[in-house]
């Protein structure tokens, strides 16, 4: 799975919009949305909300977790914890990037939100890399990592199997070498 596929999955998450048009219910494959009444909030899939926003048909309401105070608390919690903390949204980075790219004016303190989300991502990726390094050094056979998002898992997916395969080959070569030396005696 690559980043585009993760983004596709993230676009299915719901976001609240405030439409400035009237329309009956839309019958989509993923489910019905609407009706749309000017000024009344309605939840729609993120992809639809972004499309309507780009066409000037609505205003996006940022998710509760995109509040700078909540993000600051989450950043502090993540930096204090040795393990991964649960994120308020399974696709926090992708949702934040899409919302901030399509409607930064709809997000209060959008630059601060962008910085905080990036800081949280950096903290978690750093923690993930150090966890992987510890796992490889300890020659572990399995690990449990709770509260990782799909994008975070996919960021190490290309590297980890290759590294573990190389370690296995080195270990096998070392064992074969040690075995042949003991047979020489």
Image (cartoon, rainbow, N blue to C red):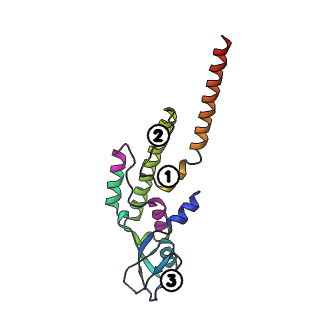
Q: What quarter of the picture does the N terminus occupy?
A: bottom right
Q: Is residue 75 left or right of residue 152?
A: left
Image disc number at residue 130: 2
Distance of mark 1 from mark 2, alpha carbons? 13 Å
Pointer 3: what residue?
27
**Looking at the image, is 107 positioned above or below residue 150?**
below
Q: Nearer the viewer, mark 3 or mark 2?
A: 3
**Looking at the image, is 113 positioned above or below residue 154?**
below
How many other residues sit within 10 Å of disc 2, few (<14), some (14-19) or many (≥20)? few
Residue 154 position in % (x across, y down): 54, 52
Counting residues from the start of the chain, the first of labels 3 and 2 encountered is 3
**Looking at the image, is 177 positioned above or below residue 93?**
above
Instruction: Find residue 127 and report its image quarter.
Output: top left
**Looking at the image, is 89 positioned above or below residue 180?**
below
Residue 73 position in % (x across, y down): 32, 55
- Give the residues in magenta: 77-100
Pointer 1: what residue?
152
Give the number of callouts.
Answer: 3
Counting residues from the start of the chain, the first of labels 1 and 2 encountered is 2
Counting residues from the start of the chain, the first of labels 3 and 1 encountered is 3
Residue 6 position in % (x across, y down): 54, 60
Q: What quarter of the picture does the C terminus occupy?
A: top right
């Amino acid at each position: 799975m690559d980043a585009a596929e993760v983004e596709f999955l993230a676009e299915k998450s719901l976001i609240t919009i405030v439409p400035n048009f009237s329309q009956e219910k839309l019958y989509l494959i993923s489910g019905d949305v609407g009706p749309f009444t000017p000024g009344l909030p309605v939840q729609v899939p993120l992809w639809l909300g972004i499309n309507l926003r780009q066409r000037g048909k609505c205003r996006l309401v940022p998710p509760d977790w995109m509040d700078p105070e909540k993000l600051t608390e989450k950043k502090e919690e993540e930096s204090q914890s040795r393990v991964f903390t649960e994120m308020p949204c399974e696709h926090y980075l992708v949702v934040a990037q899409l919302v901030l790219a399509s409607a930064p004016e709809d997000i209060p303190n959008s630059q601060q939100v962008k910085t905080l989300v990036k800081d949280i991502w950096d903290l978690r990726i750093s923690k993930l890399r150090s966890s992987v390094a510890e796992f490889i050094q300890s020659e572990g056979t399995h690990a449990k990592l709770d509260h990782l998002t799909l994008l975070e898992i996919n960021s190490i997916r290309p590297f980890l199997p290759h590294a573990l395969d190389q370690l296995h080959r080195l270990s096998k070569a070392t064992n074969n070498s040690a075995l042949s030396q003991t047979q020489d005696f």
